[in-house]
Image: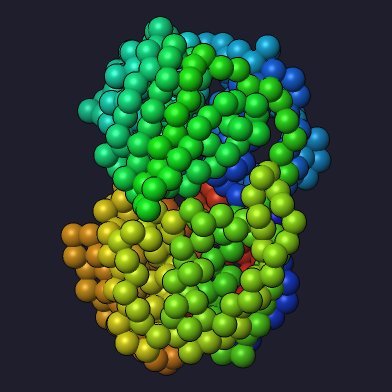
């Protein structure tokens, strides 16, 4: 357990500090960590994982896979093994509780459908308010029997025989694509999922590592994945690369804090995830990206970030899927840029752990930053490097990324910024406060 474990915290404060310096290793990627456990539970043989992100969300997925019959063992820090009974899942005895995690619940729903399992799915207050029709509809078209509470959790699934489908996803969501592909493993025939805007492709890449035959083709913007079922998975070894979404907080903190220069090692460099880094470079950020080792079939980079004079830009809607989790912290960077930063195509931001479009706007406004928010866009008026007023309370709304973004904002405000509930940070980045303290930005518990 990290020494400043967010899980045991409630309200914290951040304030201006000296230059950030030093070097940290990026925490394991959340998306790859969930998939390692789920795919391991579907695979015959022993899947060994190193560098797993041991966060609340991922541990909830580990518990769910155990309840579904897999043997999930912790063999050392970040080291896990998953052994399944001939690659088969069994009906759990109690509802599967996914806490705060949309990725966990939606992917395991797909895996259970494909494995012919009957199960109930539940989650916390935030997860229980998130839209589930996006997975209920395609899984229902494949023949899964599902009962839901007005398209929200709790959901009951009854085992059924599945058929393959051709599905054009109406939302840019890797969770939806992944749920369908996992269900397709147990369906007779070719399932085809098409995305008008391609989303993170970890499921496609990792299924191939687990021996599944899957065909992926791309055009200018979109992606088509084809999988002929039924297919089985074979265990493999996964070294989890660092999470670009988590690394973003320290990177932005260094860019906005005068005199800073930091390094973050081992960050996954997948174009479907690195839209924020492209955006920050366009804004004038001094980022040096040095190639590192390959992990789980993904390139990695070591990132050096220095305090930079940033300029506002327009971030195009087509880039949204590649940085969907990074808009709150981009809002913080934009608050200190010269001129206006306009972020377009943000519909999906409203379907996250909270309505992150409203949450980001409120976080910035509440601390003296001028913003214009519309149905699906956000414009932030930057201070050209001057500190923001601060002094506000950031309402985190059960949302870890709003909490961490609020903390970073406080580092460049005249008056301290209070985060009303930092405990949710444990869902994705349990070492966050330790890492920020290592770099020179300690938090104060209030
Ligand atoms: C994820 C997909 C994204 C992202 C989430 C992780 C995944 O959600 O926001 O943090 O691992 O597939 P959507 O697929 O709903 O966009």
Q: Residue at x 67, y 63 (%)?
A: 301
Visible in this render: residue 62?
no
Q: Percent x, y for residue 443?
A: 59, 71
Residue 251's place in the image compared with 398, above or below, is: below
Residue 133's place in the image compared with 278, above or below, is: above
Q: Residue at x 60, y 58 (%)?
A: 269
Q: Nearer the viewer, residue 338 or 213?
A: 213
Q: Residue at x 48, y 53 (%)?
A: 272
Q: Residue at x 64, y 71 (%)?
A: 289
For residue 415, side relative to residue 296 (left or right): left
Q: Percent x, y for residue 194?
A: 35, 36
Visible in this render: residue 205?
yes
Q: Residue furthest left?
A: 375
Q: Nearer the viewer, residue 186 or 349?
A: 186
Q: Percent x, y for residue 147?
A: 30, 18
Q: For residue 213, what is the image quadrant?
A: top right
Q: For residue 293, what is the image quadrant?
A: bottom right
């Amino acid at each position: 357990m990290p020494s400043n474990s967010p899980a045991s915290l409630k309200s914290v404060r951040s304030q201006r500090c000296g230059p950030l310096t030093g070097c940290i290793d990026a925490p394991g990627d959340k998306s790859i960590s969930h998939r390692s456990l789920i795919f391991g539970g579907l695979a015959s043989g022993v899947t060994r994982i190193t560098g797993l992100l041991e966060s609340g969300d991922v541990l909830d997925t580990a518990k769910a896979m155990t309840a579904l019959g897999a043997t999930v063992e912790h063999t050392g820090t970040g080291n896990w093994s998953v052994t399944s009974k001939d690659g088969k899942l069994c009906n759990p005895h109690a509802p599967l509780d996914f806490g705060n995690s949309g990725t966990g619940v939606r992917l395991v729903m797909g895996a259970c459908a494909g494995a012919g399992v009957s199960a109930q799915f539940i989650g916390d207050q935030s997860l229980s308010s998130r839209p589930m029709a996006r997975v209920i509809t395609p899984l229902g078209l494949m023949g899964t029997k599902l009962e839901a509470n007005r398209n929200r959790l709790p959901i009951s699934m009854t085992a059924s025989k599945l058929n393959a489908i051709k599905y054009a996803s109406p939302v840019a969501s890797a969770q939806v694509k992944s749920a369908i592909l996992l269900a397709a493993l147990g369906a007779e025939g070719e399932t085809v999922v098409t995305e008008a805007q391609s989303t993170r492709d970890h499921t496609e890449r990792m299924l191939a590592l687990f021996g599944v035959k899957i065909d992926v083709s791309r055009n200018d913007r979109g992606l088509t994945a084809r999988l002929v079922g039924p297919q089985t998975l074979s265990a493999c070894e996964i070294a989890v690369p660092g999470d670009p979404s988590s690394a973003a907080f320290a990177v932005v903190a260094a860019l906005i804090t005068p005199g800073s220069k930091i390094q973050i090692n081992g960050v996954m460099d997948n174009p479907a995830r690195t839209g924020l880094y492209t955006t920050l470079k366009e804004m004038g950020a001094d980022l040096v990206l040095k190639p590192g080792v390959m992990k789980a079939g993904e390139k990695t980079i070591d990132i050096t970030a220095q305090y930079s004079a940033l300029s506002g830009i327009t971030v195009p809607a087509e880039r949204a899927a590649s940085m969907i989790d990074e808009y709150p912290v981009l809002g913080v960077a934009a608050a200190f840029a010269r001129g206006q930063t306009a972020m377009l195509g943000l519909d999906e931001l409203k379907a996250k752990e909270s309505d992150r479009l409203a949450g980001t706007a409120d976080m910035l406004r509440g601390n003296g930053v001028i913003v214009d928010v519309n149905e699906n866009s956000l414009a932030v008026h930057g201070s050209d490097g001057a500190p923001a007023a601060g002094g506000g309370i950031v309402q985190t709304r059960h949302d870890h990324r709003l909490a961490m973004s609020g903390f970073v904002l406080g580092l460049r405000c005249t008056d301290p910024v209070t985060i009303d509930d930092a405990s949710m940070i444990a869902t994705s980045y349990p070492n966050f406060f330790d890492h920020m303290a290592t770099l020179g930005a300690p938090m104060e518990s209030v």
